[in-house]
Amino acid sequence: MDDLLREFLTETNESLNLVDAELVRFEQEPNNGAILGNIFRLVHTIKGTCGFLALPRLETLTHAAETLMGKFRDGMPVTAEAVTLILSTIDRIKLILDAIEKSEQEPSGGDADLIDPLGRMARQEAAAPPQVAPPPAPAPVELKKPDAPEKAEKHDKPAVERLDEERGDRLANHSIRVNVDTLDHLMTTVSELVLTRNQLLEIVRRNEDSDFKVPLQRLSSVTAELQEGVMKTRMQPIGNAWQKLPRVVRDLCAELGKDIELTMRGADTELDRQVLDLVKDPLTHLVRNCADHGIETPAARIAAGKPAKGTIRLSAWHEGGHIIIEISDDGRGLDLAGIKAKVVEKGVASEAQLAAKSEAEISNYIFAPGFTTAAKVTSISGRGVGMDVVRSNIEQIGGTVDLKSLSGAGTTFTIKIPLTLAIVSALIVEAGGERFAIPQLAVLELVRAGNNGEHRIEHIKDAPVLRLRNKLLPLVRLKEVFRLGACDNENGFVVVTQVGSQVFGIVVDGVFHTEEIVIKPMSSKLRHIPVFSGTTILGDGAVIMIIDPNGVAQALGRAAVAAARAENSELQSREEEADEDTVSLLVFRAGSQQPKAVPLSLVTRLEEIDCRKIEISDGRHLVQYRDQLMPLLRIDGETSLKKEGAQPILVFSDQGRSMGLVADEIIDIVEERLDIEVSSDRPGLLGYAVIKGATTEIIDVGHFLPQAFEDWFRRRDPSAAPRTRSVLLVDDSAFFRELLAPLIKAAGYRVVAAASAADALAALKSDTRFDLIVTDIEMPEMDGFALAEAVRAMPAAAAVPIIALATMVSAETVERGRAAGFHDFVAKFDRAGLVAAIKEQGADLNRAA
């Protein structure tokens, strides 16, 4: 295929996906000129390129759609029929593009069934909604390329639109298109490099005095950087998988007679392209399920005291190496009675068995194959082949699906998936003489169990459980799962694992180390075994199996889970009856060997800081923590910071500030009754208490907070904290915007920069409140004087002070500026004068308040 044509098809398909979503938004916000400008610009670009490539059919069709949208720009009312007609046109364009991609030629035929209604609607003639026919079968037509592109049509474009195009041009200069196969090959090559790196590291571990140790460390660092860089090239925003959902919801509203609003947050959350492709269909099905089963009809919602319009919310965010996707609705919730009736009808469980189950367990029946509560089969639902496919597809990529439902309030699906499927960090364990890899993302902690230790494996109804911090944990032994020999019922390591909301322990014989592994697909002869997700090659060349925590969770016996639930309930009752005054305490060591403790509720996080990142300034130890400087304090003179390695830190945070308390070792988290038996006069020490049979120092955290920040306690009164004032900086020069914005921020103001007067007016019309405007007076299109006059004409912004920036300040300029509404003039290069003028206007605002 010709490179120019291939580029056209790629860019046009991307543009059409955007147009789909933007049109649905525009139908809901018909007065939003920015959305209309985006749609018009995309369609206009497609039309112009069609003319250049000699694609007359596409050019004619896009021209008709562009003409109608031009009428919208001129003020013609936007109707649902018009949006439907344009969406049908977009669908037809996609079909023609598919035909061009297959044959490299534009299919013959006409599109009068769409062009005529578009023309009539543009002329505002009444016409019945068109019956859109499918396009005729494609026939070869020779592609012609003119010697030179046709001249683009001239339009007087608004400044905001022109600015968007300039920004797009600048971005285009910093990006290139790369074939996906090239990226996949690069990822495979990096994976092999990681395997080789692991093999070399294994050799160095066996030979501590090797001369290759230092260069290998450098190689390992470079490999990690290369791996991270390649992973970034494969990352795509999850919004790419959401683009078609507004159109899906709109079509469902029309088909079901419902009014539904789709809100999306976190669309810029990135994940691996391979994972993104695999979650598109499950997300679409869950949204369709919410619209069909969850959201009620407008009449039913009004009768239930709800707004007539229902809401489906999509949210995505990063959390501990995973992507969390949440799909929720404010509909009727799950019909548990209907689910129970269907379960009994299908013979899956008896009424007695259902009576012993929790609501969460009953809700999970909707994921069973062939299960549906729909009364009749429709084009949308009723076949029972949707939710089980959703769960199986998500679990195939190592993810989980959780479900929460509240009758009358709605349902929430929470999907947890890994960021990538290529290279993951894994814990290498041993069971029955064989090694296995457990993905570290699923591991919460490691516990050593034994007869003589603190943690012992117990049995309830012949099911093994572990009592961990006053909670019973159901266990599964890898030896038993894989039939690798007799089990030692008392000793072993317990890998505490979480799958969705379920937490359980995997009992293994030994734990080696963590290692970055490359996931290789399993042989077809092993794919039917649910406890394996793949294979990998270790540094010593051994091929081992990768454990799938989802499959292991299925191996847990029902007796163990039921026993753990019953024992937990019994334990909770005993605890409530015995003592309601216990508190969670974090026990640690710092300086001396005597244990110390602080209430866990005061600790924000436990961190291990690289000692190389700790800095000393004016005798104080500081570290950059979450884009802020965090002071590090020692409890007493005996406590010292480590010279190398990781330094344990207890982080205390409040109102945007953090303080770190240096520790030598974190011992445990315990639930104890805090009874200080001996008080202390030593600063920073409340006294002594007996914790887990040992005399423990109870630390007074309040003593250290003012040492980190003197005003820590004084800033507790929120009414005393002044509101951060906002400044709107307007300048068409990117250089001066970048020069002045940090200066104004340093003066204590929040800065919003605008590249033109039109952008500034748009910002003022939004919900953002500005306390001051700083603007250049020499700008194209609309200068600073015209901007000031426009601001004075806006009721909401008429009282906002305006400071003018000018290269030369003359008496005539000042007089004209006063008439326009400027409060002060400052020379453009007088940075000190600008700060003084801003503070003066701020003082006037304070006096006025």
Image (spheres, grey):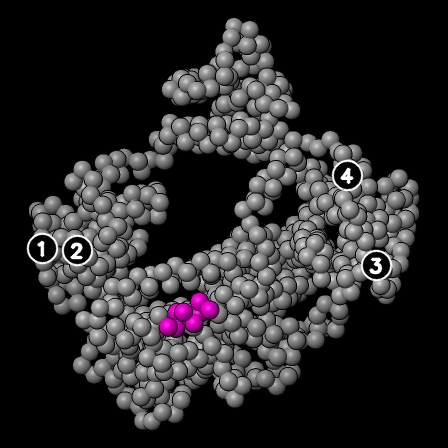
Amino acid residing under circle 3? Glu
Q: Which residues are magenta?
A: 189-196
Left or right: 196 as drawn, with respect to 820: left
Earlier sequence position, callout 2 versus callout 1: 2
- What residue would you read off at disc 3? 142
In the visual, does 640 lie left or right of 81? Answer: left
Residue depicted at 32% across the width and 83% down the height: 430
Q: Are marks 2 and 3 in contact (CB under 8 Å)?
A: no
Disc nearest the viewer among 2 and 4: 4
| 113 over 205 or under it: above or below | above
Distance between the Cα atoms at labels 2 and 3? Answer: 75 Å
Q: CA distance from mark 2 to mark 1?
A: 31 Å
Residue 546 image point, x, y percent = 42, 79
Instruction: Give the percent coordinates (x, y) of residue 633.
Output: 19, 47
Q: Secondary structure at mark 2?
A: loop
Q: Residue tagged by mark 2?
A: 642
- Across and down, in percent, residue 116 comes to 90, 48
Report the label total: 4
Q: Quadrant of the N terminus?
A: bottom right
Tag 2: amino acid? Lys
Q: CA distance from mark 3 to mark 4?
A: 23 Å
Of mark 2 and mark 3, the one earlier in the sequence is: 3
Residue 151 lies in what quarter of the image?
A: top right
Q: CA distance from mark 4 to mark 1?
A: 90 Å
